[in-house]
Image: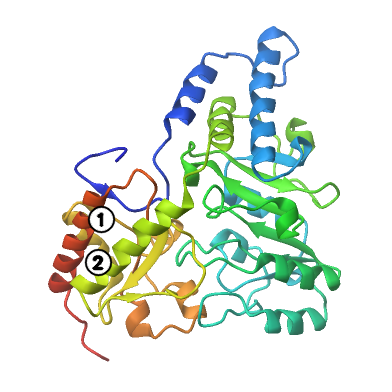
Amino acid sequence: MAGDRSCAYFDYNASAPLLDVARDAMVEAMGCTGNASSVHGRGRAARRLLEDARAAVAQSVGAAPQDVVFTSGATEANALACAGRPACRVLASAIEHDSVRAMAAPGRCIPVCHDGTIDLVRLRALLEEDPCPELVAVMLANNETGVIQPVAAAAALARSAGALVHCDAVQGWRRMPFTLDSLGVDSLSLSAHKAGGPKGAGALIVRDGVLREALLRGGGQERGWRAGTENVAALAGFGAVAASHPPASTALRGTRDVLEDAACRAVPETHVIARQSDRLPNTTMLALPGRDAEALVIRLDLEGIAVSAGSACSSGKVGPSHVLAAMNLAPELASGAIRVSFGPEVTRSDVDAFVSAWCEAAAACGRRPRR
């Protein structure tokens, strides 16, 4: 697989290896010295690269180029979508990424069912309460469990209550088909590096008239919604990924199913979180009761396997996953849950290496004593 051959990389949901098409586009763009806001020839050349990328990203989600606001990543895109709205007017699901949760009403969120999907009945009830939210945020697919959310159904409920809808579509982009219209949302966020593009490039796809205020001011870039000289090279890589063919979901799903079956056979106490739910084809969350997830991650790393314990954005924090807590997963199980995510570069030998390391980790990381 791409990258260090001594390590089997199963952490694509944190960051996927850079695709060749992205690298080639970035190298070519680095030779363009102009500023995309300059009117001379070199500036126009940079602008052309930028607008080609914008058109490719827009087309990948069925949007118009003018709907694309380039950002430094999905965290900024999520913040921009919520900007200008009081937290009490933003209703988010309990399993949203921290960049959305930080902008929403504290202690008031859309709960999820045990299968990891948002509770549409409770959403309807929340929308009937006062004050009615201005913005409802529901992610497309959870970054930890991979569970795909009923975004279109949630959007229909929100719209009937007069609310706008934002969708963090980061994990679903290029792993499942969708468009802005099929989801029925007013804005959605994307990140290049989750799909094989460069880090530091993202986008907010947003319908006209939805945004309230800019986060970064002082320049006219991105139609005034995001000041600052655009990173043309990174955005060219983003556009190249958007224009390329996405991985075959059937093959990814087959790899996931083989890995889950093999892990459960090798270590019978293995639990697959939300196994019966509709999930991303490249993502599984495995748990060993009574184990410590951080210890499992470290042990697997020693065996040459790279995985995560939940969101990489929160990897420096010590504490239970808010996603698994929202699903009411037993603490003994949630404490020993790791995320395994991959791409088409993963081979059968990588899967075999993971299963072997999983056995070693299960044996080395004994159950913690009950309190």
Q: Identity of the amino acid at label 2?
A: Ala
**Quadrant (top left/top right/bottom left/bottom right) for the N terminus:** top left
Placement of 144 over or under 67, stated as above or below: below
Which numbered marker is on residue 262? 2
The amino acid pointed to by label 1 is Val
Residue at the disc numbered 1: 351
Number of numbered discs visible in the structure rendering: 2
76 shown above or below 292: above
Tell whether 269 sits left or right of 114. Answer: left
Whether label 1 touches label 2, CB < 8 Å: yes
Mark 2 surroundings within 10 Å by alpha-carbon count, few (fewer than 14), some (14 through 19), many (20 or more): some
Residue 311 falls in image quadrant: bottom left
Describe residue 168's horizontal placement relative to residue 68 as left or right.
left
Q: Quadrant of residue 19?
A: top left
Give the class, few, some or many, for how many residues have Cα within 10 Å of label 1's Cα (few <14, many ≥20).
many
Q: What is the x, y in percent for residue 75? A: 58, 51
Q: Secondary structure at mark 2?
A: helix
Horizontal side of residue 64 vs 360, given as left or right: right
Residue at x-position 57% and y-position 14%: 32
Say whether disc 1 or disc 2 marks the residue closer to the N-terminus. Answer: 2
